Structures are given as C-alpha cells and as structure tokens.
Image (spheres, rainbow, N blue to C red):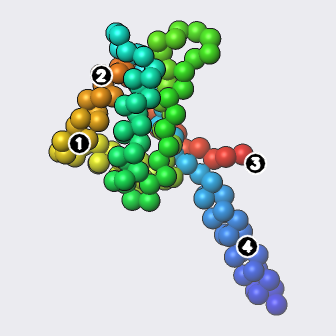
C-alpha cells in the first residue's frame, strides 16, 4: 500500500512540476537607444514586422515583444522585452534571424535603422502566483 501511495504522491508532484514549468518563459532584454531622427513609432512599426515574421517562422509561435519606454528619464532610451515560450523557441528564433532570407534581412535592417541596441541579457522567468 505504501508503494501505491508513494507512486500517487510522486505522480502528483511531477504533475505539479509540469504545471509550474508551463508557466516558465525565456525573456531576452535589449537596452537600446533611438537613432537620430527616429521615433518610438518607428521602433513599434519595425518590431511589429519582426514579431509577425517570428511567429510565422518559429515552431509554435507565441513569441511576444514589448518595446518599453521610460515614463521619466532619458526618452531616447528604451528596452525591448522579448518573451519566448521556451529556450528551444528562442534558439530557433536565433536561427531564423541568421537565415539568408531577403525578408528577414529587410526586417533586421528596419530594426537597426530605428534604434541601436548596446547590450542584451537572456533570463528564465517564472510567473509568481
């Protein structure tokens, strides 16, 4: 009986761990600055193309991106908050960005024209709650 109870407890723990893992995301943060003569609207427009393309070309999609602008501070600086459902999804995005496709080259050129990003960091994020 103890073995059966242990098995049920183990399965329950594993199921809970799976549920927690489902709430985990990979977040890539970029620190950027608007290029001369560009606006946050230019960033938003270029970023919309990137998000659409990635969600069409990365298995499973669900890639989200938020250009976050300051409410107070240096208004030419902002961060991109790119969110991926998994590390595998992020790695596939990197491959898609590196592809020799005219469309992705144009999208990346649009992002580069709007802003210059000086650094980034990749995080594992787990929602609290």
Mark 4–mark 3 CB contact (< 8 Å) = no
Cα separation between marks 1 and 4? 47 Å
Residue at image point 30% right, 25% down = 112
Indicate the secondary structure of the residue bearing disc 2.
helix
Q: Is residue 3 left or right of residue 96?
A: right
Q: To which residue does mark 4 refer? A: 12
- Please state which of residues 39 and 115 is positioned toward the viewer in this rendering: 39
Position of residue 12 relative to residue 114, above or below, is: below
Query: For the residues marked 2 and 3, what is the alpha-carbon distance in whole angstroms?
Result: 39 Å
**Does 51 sit above or below residue 45?**
below
For residue 31, say whether it is visible. Answer: no
Image marks 1 and 4: residues in contact by CB distance under 8 Å = no
Residue tagged 1: 103
**Going from the N terminus, do you reach mark 4 or mark 3 first?**
4
For the residues marked 4 and 3, what is the alpha-carbon distance in whole angstroms?
19 Å
Indicate which disc, 2 or 3, sits on the residue closer to the N terminus.
2
The residue carrying mark 3 is 129
User: In the rendered structure, which disc, 2 or 1, sits on the residue that comes first in sequence?
Assistant: 1
In the image, residue 104 lies at what x, y percent? Answer: 26, 41
The residues bearing labels 3 and 1 have C-alpha atoms spaced at a distance of 40 Å
Determine the image quadrant of residue 38.
top left
Precedes in sequence: disc 3 or disc 1: 1
For disc 2, the marked residue is 113
Q: CA distance from mark 2 to mark 4?
A: 51 Å
């Amino acid at each position: 009986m103890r073995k059966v109870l242990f098995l049920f407890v183990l399965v329950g723990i594993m199921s809970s761990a799976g549920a927690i893992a489902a709430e985990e995301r990979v977040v890539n943060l970029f620190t950027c600055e608007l290029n001369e003569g560009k606006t946050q609207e230019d960033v938003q427009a270029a970023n919309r193309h990137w998000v659409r393309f990635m969600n069409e070309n990365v298995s499973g999609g669900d890639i989200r991106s938020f250009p976050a602008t300051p409410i107070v501070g240096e208004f030419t600086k902002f961060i991109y908050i790119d969110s991926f459902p998994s590390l595998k999804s992020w790695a596939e995005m990197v491959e898609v960005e590196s592809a020799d496709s005219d469309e992705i080259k144009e999208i990346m050129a649009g992002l580069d024209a709007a802003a210059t990003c000086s650094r980034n960091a990749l995080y594992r994020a787990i929602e609290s709650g």
